[in-house]
Amino acid sequence: MSSQKKAYLALTVTSIVWGTTWVASKIGISHMHAAFQLASIRQFLGGSIYVIFFLIKGEKLPTAKQFLWLSAMAFLMFVSANGIATYGLQFITSGLAALIAALYPLSVVLIERFYFKAIKINLPTLIGLLLGIVGIGFIFYKDSMQAHGPDYLLGVGLSMFAMICWSIGSIIIARTKMEINSYNSIGWQMLISAACMGLYTLLSGNYIPFNEIPAISWGAIIYMVIGGSIFAFISFIYSMKHLKPAIASLYAYINPIVAIWVGSLLLNEKMTWNSIVGTICTLIGVYLVNWSLKKQKDPVEAISDADGM
């Protein structure tokens, strides 16, 4: 098999696995009912794999300055983003959560434009932003509001907050020069966030003894760690090396579609015409925004989530 064919296979693995991690997270929470504990275990296992790998390769431990920076990023990216997104999954479908997470390039554009004045909003960018808003509007229209309980809006709000936190973290990372391997950095951020969320679960009392965690929740966690954090991430790196960036980045638009379809099959999450049309509009909008940014001289590149938050 040629390198290009392997790269397309890797892209397929990335798209499917990262899309299904949203469904796996939903399944894990549905049987565990301790979202921050689930996120903590997931990040601890995933972070340990990364950190141990780089320590074996001879990477040094972070300096005090690096550790402070890693701690801040861990709280922003993995506690405020991943942890809260996981918590919000209790109230909304996995497909909607994945779609909201996919909106972060739009949030990055608005922050960069109005805070840093670094991005020009040209016609394609404006059309993309409007399509993203219209798409989400379709999904929230009538039946979405009526088909869910009062916690539905809470779940949407938490997911939006998590997406914005991820956007802010992406901008900070892109604008900060820190002398540490980026993948090693992810490992340390995962470990630090696992400690934060683990401490919170103990103090709040909202946790389950390890021996009482259902087997299906352990299975979901293991799938997210091995599938999402290892195989999909390795596949993502391989596809980025052997495919054009525009093609390799297509996974970001496939993830929500995979989450929606798999969620409908495994979790009986209803799909309406509003949600289908809204998803198409939103993803086209995100694509236009990303495309328009690449045409500009100094854009902040959208930093992709290894596991979809």
Image: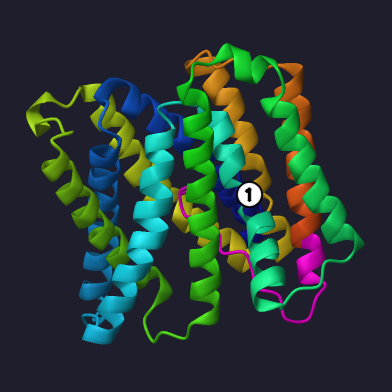
How many residues crowd mark 1 within 10 Å: few (<14), some (14–19), many (20+)?
A: many
Q: Residue at x 37, y 36 (%)?
A: 87
Residue 96 in the image: x percent, y percent?
Answer: 58, 32
State which quadrant residue 70 falls in: bottom left
The residue drawn where x is 29% and y is 69% is 71
Query: Residue 150: in sight, yes or no?
Result: yes
Vertical relation: 8 (above or below) 118: above
On screen, residue 208 versus residue 48, left or right, reads left
Q: Quadrant of residue 171?
A: bottom right
Residue in front for this viewpoint, 2 or 307? 307
Q: Where is residue 134 in the image (x, y as percent from the top left)?
A: 79, 38
Q: Is residue 259 visible?
A: no
- Residue 298 versus residue 287 in the image, above or below: below
Q: Identify the residue under disc 1.
A: 252
Q: What stretch is highlighted in magenta?
A: 291-309
Estimate the x, y position of residue 298 in percent, counting from the top left.
Answer: 72, 81
